[in-house]
Image (spheres, rainbow, N blue to C red):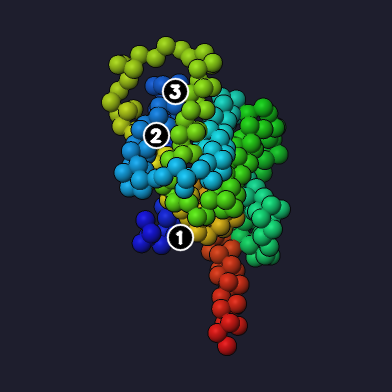
Amino acid sequence: MKRIPTFVLLGAVPLVWGMNFHLARYCVQHLPPNTVGSIRFIIATLLLLPLFLALERPKWPSLKPHLVAMAVVGATGVFGYNYLFFKAMQTTSPTNASLLLAFNPLATLLLSTLWLKKEARPLQWVGVTLGMAGVLLIVTRGELQALLGMKISYGEILLLLVALSFAFANIIVRKYLQSVSSLATSTVSTIVGTLLLLAVAWFEPHPAVPFTATPLSVWLALFFMTMGGSIIGYIAWNHSVAKVGAEKAALFMNLTPFYTVLIALCMGQPVELLQLLGGGCIVSGIVMANLQLKRKAAKPMQVSSS
């Protein structure tokens, strides 16, 4: 993973997550949402743990100072994100969900500015705004009524907490876990998130599910969601956040709805021109913000070499 450019990883992870929206919708047609989430992260834990032990052979003294931070990432970025998301989807529409989850880059930038004392440059704010405008075009199809008619419900409040949970996890990775491998962070946080999901599932009523009657395609979709989104995706994302910063990486999350539209197009679902224009705004916003940061970063190097 170290040989892959960071921005390639940041562009690829939202593609996997965009695909997971389609796979998740297919899975919940056959299994309860909480069951899908729990099974997904049980598989992730069973695959990540032996991989982590075999490749890194961790020692307790090296992990102990970072356990609290990794546990917080698991509680917020894994458990908080997934539990609140599935709860919210029971009472809100996909349009409102997509719109409110697009709050994450702004939430990350705000937390980074307040907590990490990062300077938010003007063009970076323009990039975030342009990216969010692109998301608005995609999820509202350019209709102002979709925004004016929005009423904040219990589910939508949960979605705002989802965005804040993931933003908080990004900040923790950047502030406390830069020296820890992405595989270690992903493994420990996934274990913590899985245990919390199972603990909550234990006390929540679930309908009896005939697993033997579940189609094989559902299990294959769950496995792909786990490998792509929960294992490779989380490792690549945590690696990238530690390298480039939470506020910079969060901009790439706006690619997720854009990729979701492209996947829908490939599946033969109708896609409007405004949705493609929205994707263009998203990409432009990411490029604009990162060009500004790159230009500012290059200036001290020129001074020191002269």
Q: What element carries label 3?
A: helix
C-alpha gap between disc 1 and disc 3: 33 Å
Q: Please identify the residue farthest to the top as the structure is shown.
A: 208
Q: Point out residue 7 in the picture as x, y percentages from the top left corner.
A: 45, 60
Quarter of the image with the N terminus in it: bottom left
Q: In this view, does 103 lie to the left or right of 42?
A: right
The vertical placement of 233 against 252, above or below, is above
Count of number-bearing discs = 3
Tell me, yes or no, if residue 116 can be seen here: yes
The vertical placement of 72 against 111, above or below, is above
- What residue is disc 2 on? 45
Quarter of the image where one finds residue 299: bottom right
What's under tag 2, amino acid-wise?
Thr
Q: Which of marks 2 and 1 is in front?
A: 2
Q: Earlier along the polypeptide chain: callout 1 or callout 3? A: 1
Q: In this view, does 268 lie to the left or right of 176?
A: left
Q: Point out residue 213 in the picture as x, y percentages from the top left corner.
A: 31, 16
- What residue is disc 1 on? 7
Residue 84, numbered label: none
Q: What element carries label 2?
A: helix
Q: Nearer the viewer, residue 246 or 129?
A: 246
- What residue is disc 3 on? 35
Q: Nearer the viewer, residue 139 or 202?
A: 202
